[in-house]
C-alpha cells in the first residue's frame, strides 16, 4: 500500500470510495460539500504542488448524496512544470481507495456558437492537440491504452439522464487539449475547428489517458467560460475564466449530485 493511501485510510477510514472527481478552475465548491475529511495535497506523498490560483489543492473523502466519494480539489496542469503525468499518483491513489469511475471538470473556451459562456458541455471525445502523453516512459505494455470510448458511454448516459432530470442542458462535444499557459491564437482556433474540436482547454486529457490506463471509467464536463479566441470581442484571461466559471458551476453541481443520487 502506498504511503498516501495509508495516510488517507488513517484519517478518512477504510471504507472504499466509489466515484472520484477532479475539479477545474473555479469549480471547487463540490469539494466543500463532501461530508468527511479534507487532506491537503502537501500531506500526501506524490500528490502535486498546485500553483494555479482558483484551485483548492486538497483531497476530500467522504459522503456526497449517499455515495462515498474522493474529490481531488485541484489538478497540476502540464503548463505548470511541463509534466503531463503530474496527476498519476493522485489517480493511482483514488483507484486504490476503490474508485471505479472518474469524473473530471474543467473550464473551457467554446468553438460552437450554440454553446455559450455559462453553458456546460459533456465531452463525447477529445483531441490531443498538444501531442504530449502522460504514458511516455511507462515501461510496460499496459502503456498501449485503447482510447475508443475513452469517455465512457455508460457514465455519459448517466450524466445526461441526471442533467435531463435537473432540467439543465448538457450538449456533447469534442474537447481539444491545448498545452497552455498562453491562450490559443485565432488561427489555432480555426485549425481546431477544422479538426473537429468543439471546445478548447488546458487540462483533462492527460487525466483521461491516465485514468483509462488505470482501468477507471471516465467522463468529463466542461464549463464554458468564454468563446474561443477570435470568436468574440470579449477579452480572454485567467481572471475572466475564474470570474465566469461559477456561472456554470451551480448547474454542474446539480448534475453531479443527481448523478450520485442515481447510484444509490
Ligand atoms: N482556451 C484554453 N483554456 C481555457 C479557455 C480557452 O479559451 N477558457 C477557459 N480555459
Image (cartoon, rainbow, N blue to C red):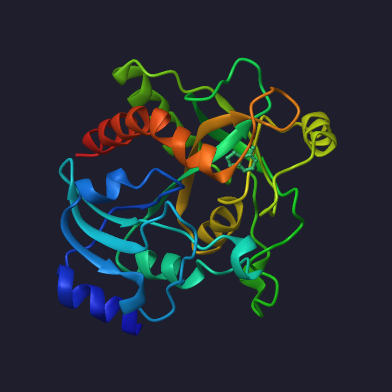
Q: Is residue 120 left or right of residue 84?
A: left
Q: Quadrant of the C terminus?
A: top left
Instruction: Confirm whether residue 1 shows in the render.
Output: no
Which quadrant would residue 92 be assigned to in this image?
bottom left
Q: Is residue 259 left or right of residue 51?
A: left
Give the image location of residue 120, x and y in percent.
48, 28
Residue at (50% x, 43% y) in the render: 106
Q: Nearer the viewer, residue 84 or 159?
A: 84
Q: Quadrant of ligand 1?
A: top right
Give the image location of residue 164, x and y in percent.
36, 18
Residue at (71% x, 49% y) in the render: 128
Q: Quadrant of the N terminus?
A: bottom left
Instruction: Confirm whether residue 210 shows in the render.
Output: yes
Give the image location of residue 65, x and y in percent.
18, 40
Identify whether 231 is placed above or below 52.
above
Q: Nearer the viewer, residue 187 or 124?
A: 187
Identify whether 231 is placed above or below 27.
above
Which quadrant would residue 57 be assigned to in this image?
bottom left
Residue at (39% x, 43% y) in the render: 27
Which quadrant would residue 149 be assigned to in this image?
top right
Residue at (20% x, 74% y) in the render: 9
Give the image location of residue 193, x and y in percent.
78, 30
Amino acid at each position: 500500500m502506498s504511503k498516501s493511501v495509508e495516510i488517507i485510510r488513517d484519517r478518512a477510514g477504510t471504507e472504499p470510495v466509489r466515484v472520484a472527481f477532479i475539479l477545474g478552475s473555479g469549480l471547487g465548491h463540490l469539494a466543500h460539500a463532501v461530508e468527511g475529511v479534507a487532506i491537503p495535497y502537501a500531506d500526501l506523498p506524490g500528490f502535486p504542488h498546485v500553483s494555479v490560483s482558483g484551485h483548492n489543492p486538497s483531497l476530500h473523502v467522504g459522503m456526497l448524496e449517499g455515495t462515498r466519494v474522493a474529490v481531488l480539489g485541484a489538478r497540476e496542469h502540464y503548463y505548470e512544470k511541463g509534466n503531463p503525468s503530474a496527476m498519476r499518483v493522485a489517480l493511482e491513489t483514488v483507484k486504490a481507495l476503490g474508485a471505479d469511475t472518474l469524473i473530471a471538470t474543467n473550464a473551457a473556451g467554446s468553438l460552437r456558437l450554440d454553446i455559450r459562456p455559462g453553458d456546460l458541455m459533456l465531452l463525447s471525445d477529445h483531441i490531443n492537440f498538444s501531442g504530449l502523453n502522460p504514458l511516455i516512459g511507462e515501461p510496460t505494455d499496459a502503456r498501449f491504452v485503447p482510447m475508443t470510448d475513452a469517455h465512457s458511454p455508460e457514465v455519459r448516459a448517466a450524466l445526461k439522464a441526471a442533467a435531463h432530470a435537473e432540467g439543465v442542458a448538457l450538449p456533447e462535444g469534442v474537447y481539444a487539449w491545448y498545452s497552455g499557459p498562453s491562450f490559443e491564437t485565432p488561427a489555432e482556433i480555426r485549425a481546431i475547428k477544422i479538426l473537429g474540436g468543439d471546445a478548447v482547454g488546458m487540462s483533462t486529457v492527460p487525466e483521461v489517458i491516465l485514468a483509462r490506463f488505470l482501468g477507471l471509467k471516465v467522463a468529463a464536463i466542461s464549463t464554458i467560460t468564454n468563446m474561443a479566441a477570435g470568436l468574440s470581442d470579449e477579452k480572454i484571461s485567467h481572471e475572466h475564466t475564474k470570474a465566469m466559471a461559477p456561472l456554470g458551476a451551480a448547474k454542474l453541481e446539480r448534475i453531479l449530485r443527481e448523478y450520485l443520487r442515481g447510484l444509490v
